[in-house]
Image (tube, rainbow, N blue to C red):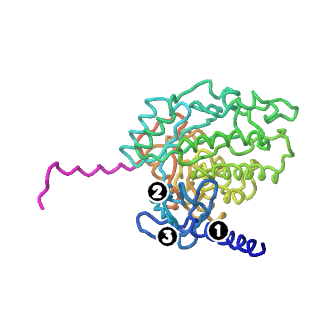
Amino acid sequence: MANLERFLVLALLVLLLWSGGALALNGRVIDGVSGKPIADAIVTADKSVVRTDGQGKYRLGITAGRVAARAYGYRQAAATVAGQPPRVADIALMPFRPKALYLSFYGIGDRKLRQAALDLATSTEINALVIDVKGDRGMIPYRSHVALAAEVGAQKIITVRNIEEQIRLLKDRNLYLIARIVVFKDSLLAVARPELAVKTAGGRLWRDREGLAWVDPFRREVWDYAIAVAVEAAALGFDEIQFDYVRFPDATGLSFSRPNTEASRVGAISGFFAAAREALAPYNVFVAGDIFGYVCWNLDDTAIGQRLDDLTGQLDYISPMLYPSGFQFGIPGCRNPVAHPREIVSETLARAAQRSGLPGVRFRPWLQAFKDYAFGGRQFGAAEIRAQIDAAENSGSDGWMLWNPHNRYTSDGLKSRPAPAPAPPAGPQPR
């Protein structure tokens, strides 16, 4: 009996060693152009997530299926794992910098606005779209399987009848797709579920300057709703999930479910991003967050819960909103921001990189493509747009995104896309 027990123990040890070695998946993540290894790439299989080492190598304890990878400054890629051990899957990632236009809840569903954006993607350097998946007013443009969306009225207007087909058509154009999800500015949820809403000191529903109610960033139910919408978008095929309005309202005298202190605010915002990142891990999507431009300059949380140092570990990309019109107090040396669009972008990104210790590729700014509203109504045309783009690219940023709330864009300030090379003539060619 003792011999049998020893045999079983040895057999079990052999099995464990074999499954942890021969059955494990090994591979490298490499640059698809240079062939060089990519260190610190993120490799995902099911719910397992690992990082590559300095030689681009990774190891996962899986036996078969699909393995995917992503890295900052690259487009995602995946490989199918099958066959007999040992299993090896190398993944090549192509360098990529998104250059995006924003399409709102209505813009993505409007044929003329959508086609105008696609035409620019054909004729200019535009290669990405930021699409409202949950917009400023809480609406979701397509039929969602998230039950709460219908319950709160987020499905009363459907602007995209077949989201799967729309994504397929956009992907056929090789466009990088970013799902924008507005989180704590959600009037529909606040009105339908007043126990989740931000209140006045007197306990009444609070509304912002647009007359919209917000939801309490401390409430986990609010987190869960936004994250459920994000997971659905990731499953649909979006390449990146970008969360916006992940902050407290910039107003005083408000009431929340927990004491409103800097520490509690920062904890709520970074906590939401951490929860979202964990839920999205199986989908190999990049996770991004929009922040106020002044967050890159301020050492505190700007009284809204956004403190730069506490965001860097939770996000793949940080997207400061660098609209010169939004810098109402200017920055050092630039008292009139709209007269210095290049400096606003370059100096803010430089300050963000210096403070965070992150390389430029971890930032992708929002740039102004709309008429100034704060310093005399200056038009933002080709010169202003190009100045912002050049500043972002010179900083090493992971591309840039143009914001126009009306979704009306022109080629002003954009580089033309080179014409494709002519196809070779049909038939046999001379040797």
Q: Is residue 113 visible?
A: yes
Magenta highlight range: 415-431
**Residue 151 screen position, x and y as percent:** 70, 27
Residue placed farthest to the top in the image? 156
**Residue 336 screen position, x and y as percent:** 59, 49
> Which one is in front, 75 or 27?
27
Q: Residue at left 59%, top 44%?
A: 325
Looking at the image, tell me whether mark 2 or mark 3 is earlier in sequence order. Answer: 3
**Secondary structure under badge 3?**
loop
Q: Residue at label 1?
A: 15
Label at residue 96: 2
Q: Residue at label 3?
A: 37
Disc nearest the viewer among 2 and 1: 1
Looking at the image, tell me whether mark 3 or mark 1 is earlier in sequence order. Answer: 1
Label 2 is placed on what type of residue? Phe
Label at residue 46: none
Dominant SS in magenta: loop
